[in-house]
Image (cartoon, rainbow, N blue to C red):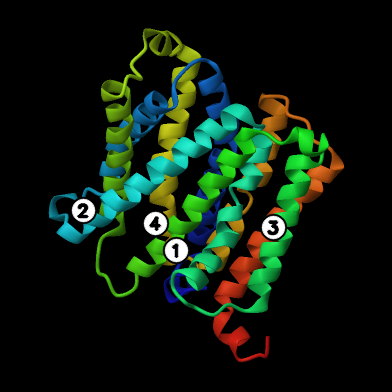
């Protein structure tokens, strides 16, 4: 518990937890909703443009106290992380088009396990053996999840695209961790710029690179618009604002544990909404991936203690 959270009323802490739970639910539902959107015929660039363009005004409200004092460093960081976010979501949305929503929800969690490996390879930071154990568990979990139903014949490009998204997300988390210490930038401003960049890149792709097709706009039925609005408000603007606020007043462990429920909600909504099915082997794989992520997070938060022990 942080010093700030220790001073907060218990009811406020529970409200923050509830807000984070809503984020986990929204993110879990997003895989099924994205799948229905792209299967309806909406292209990935158009979807990302609409989702983030609609989210920007809500995020701007959250940044209203600092939006008129954006620093150059915030602009540079926002553009950098916005480009990474666009790449992540492009892989993720394309991936969910070709794999199951439940697979996507579990495989993206691999990003958490990859962060310490980026720290080791790119940052030269030694890691405890627990990190490598988590990596091994994660790889085995991925294998069970991807091949547990139909063996190697069950492999598909969607799973590969989601793992690519996880790879880039892991790098994004690593870079954000490198830039954050000692830099007195507004994370709210950086996040707002990220959202604007994703919307602009989506628009650029739609208008300039030939992804402007009438059939895509015909696919934007009232039902699809509701899905996009839900993703814009709850899975994007609210999710970012809630995370930024929770990071200031709650412990990273508490936040991480609540948000780690995302893949389980992804599986639940995949079964309820798009009628996914998976067997016990795949379920075991999903649990192993989440367990590996939690082990990796624990190793990171207890790094100082673990480094005093022999590997």
Label located before the other in sequence (3 or 1) = 3
Label 3: how many Cα within 10 Å (few below 14, some 14–19, many 20+):
many
Find numbered disc 1 in the image and state the secondary structure of the residue it sits on.
Answer: helix
Residue 29 on image: x %, y %: 58, 35
Q: Which residue is mark 1?
A: 174
Q: Nearer the viewer, mark 3 or mark 4?
A: 3
Residue at 52% across, 63% down: 115
Residue at 52% across, 31% down: 94
Per the model, the C-alpha gap separating discs 3 and 1 is 18 Å
Q: Which residue is mark 3?
A: 138
Find numbered disc 2 in the image and state the secondary structure of the residue it sits on.
Answer: helix
Front residue of 148 and 236:
148
Find numbered disc 3 in the image and state the secondary structure of the residue it sits on.
Answer: helix
- Asked if the residues shown at circle 3 and circle 4 are in contact, with their CB atoms under 8 angstroms apart, the answer is no
Per the model, the C-alpha gap separating discs 2 and 1 is 19 Å
In this rendering, does residue 20 appear at all?
yes
Count numbered badges in the picture. 4
Front residue of 62 and 29:
29
Label located before the other in sequence (4 or 1) = 1
Front residue of 246 and 284:
284
Q: Quadrant of residue 31?
A: top right
Q: Which residue is mark 4?
A: 244
Residue 256 on image: x %, y %: 56, 60
Residue at 59% across, 67% down: 297
Residue 238 on image: x %, y %: 41, 43
């Amino acid at each position: 518990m942080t010093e700030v959270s220790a001073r907060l009323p218990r009811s406020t802490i529970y409200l923050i937890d509830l807000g984070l739970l809503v984020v986990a639910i929204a993110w879990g539902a997003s895989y099924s909703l994205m799948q229905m959107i792209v299967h309806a015929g909406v292209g990935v660039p158009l979807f990302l443009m609409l989702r983030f363009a609609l989210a920007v005004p809500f995020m701007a409200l959250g940044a209203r106290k600092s939006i008129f004092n954006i620093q150059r460093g915030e602009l540079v960081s926002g553009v950098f992380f916005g480009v990474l976010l666009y790449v992540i979501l492009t892989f993720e949305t394309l991936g969910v088009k070709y794999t199951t929503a439940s697979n996507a929800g579990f495989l993206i969690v691999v990003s958490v396990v990859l962060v310490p490996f980026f720290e080791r390879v790119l940052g030269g930071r030694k890691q405890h053996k627990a990190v490598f154990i988590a990596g091994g568990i994660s790889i085995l979990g991925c294998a069970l999840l991807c091949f547990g139903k139909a063996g190697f014949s069950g492999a598909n490009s969607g799973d590969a695209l989601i793992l690519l998204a996880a790879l880039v997300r892991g790098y994004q988390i690593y870079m954000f961790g490198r830039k954050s210490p000692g830099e007195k930038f507004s994370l709210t401003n950086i996040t707002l710029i990220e959202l604007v960049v994703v919307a602009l890149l989506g628009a650029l792709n739609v208008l300039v690179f030939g992804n402007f097709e009438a059939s895509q706009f015909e696919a934007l039925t009232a039902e699809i618009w509701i899905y996009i609005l839900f993703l814009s408000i709850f899975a994007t603007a609210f999710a970012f604002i809630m995370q930024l606020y929770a990071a200031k007043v709650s412990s990273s462990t508490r936040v991480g544990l609540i948000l780690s429920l995302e893949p389980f909600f992804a599986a639940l909504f995949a079964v309820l909404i798009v009628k996914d099915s998976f067997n016990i082997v795949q379920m075991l794989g999903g649990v192993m991936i989440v367990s590996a992520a939690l082990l990796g997070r624990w190793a990171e938060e207890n790094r100082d203690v673990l480094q005093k022990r022999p590997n």
